[in-house]
Image: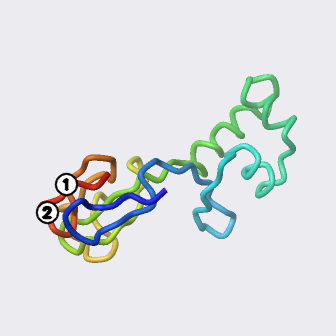
Amino acid sequence: MSHHCNHCDFQTEQLLPQDYVITPQGKRVTTQSVTSTFSSLYHINDQQLHQALKHQTPEATIIQQMLNQLTGQLHPHHCHQCARPFSLDLQRDKHACPHCWSQDISSANMDNTCPKCHQGQVS
């Protein structure tokens, strides 16, 4: 679903956070299912993963630590300086635009002031 400014030509697709898993190569991959993607990337079968999440195995602590270090949520943002959209992990990333490094950024959610014209509302 696309969201548009009611005053200018600005539009964006993403307003909701997206889960991600970090690959062994260090790339963030967005996913609908963290557990399935994690299992596939790190060769941990679903049964082992679910048992670990319920603390039913000796490896539970290690798998929990891996999940904490290798998963997260990307929250969509817009820069008020350059008007470009981007996503941040609020727990890990610097709170600045990765395109122009401005800290004049805002979370992209409905009824936000347009980052391009600063007059309209994005909905």
Rendering quarter of residue 5? bottom left
Q: Residue at x 84, y 40 (%)?
A: 46
For the point 26% across and 47% down, the residue is 111
Expressed as whole percent of the image width and height from the top left, the position of residue 84 reads 31, 71
Q: Name the residue carrying label 2.
A: 118
Chain-order first, disc 1 or disc 2: 1
Q: Are there few (<14), some (14-19), or many (20+) residues within 10 Å of tag 2?
A: some
Vertical relation: 116 (above or below) 92:
below
Image coords of residue 75 (percent x, y): 42, 51
Residue placed at 23% from the left, 75% from the top? 82
Q: Quadrant of residue 78?
A: bottom left
Q: Are marks 1 and 2 in contact (CB under 8 Å)?
A: yes
Does residue 71 appear to the left or right of 94 in the view shown?
right
Image location (x, y in percent) of residue 96: 27, 63
Q: Secondary structure at mark 1?
A: strand
Q: Please, what secondary structure does the residue beneath circle 2 have?
A: loop
Residue type at numbered disc 2:
His
Residue 77 placement: quadrant: bottom left
Residue 20: percent from left, percent from top: 59, 53
* Residue 47 vertical placement versus 109 (above, below): above
**Residue 113: which numbered mark, if any?**
1
Determine whether, in the image, residue 48 is placed left or right of residue 7. right
Q: Is residue 2 left or right of residue 123?
A: right
- Which residue occupies the foreground of this view, 109 or 10? 10
Coloring scheme used: rainbow
Q: Amino acid at mark 1?
A: Thr
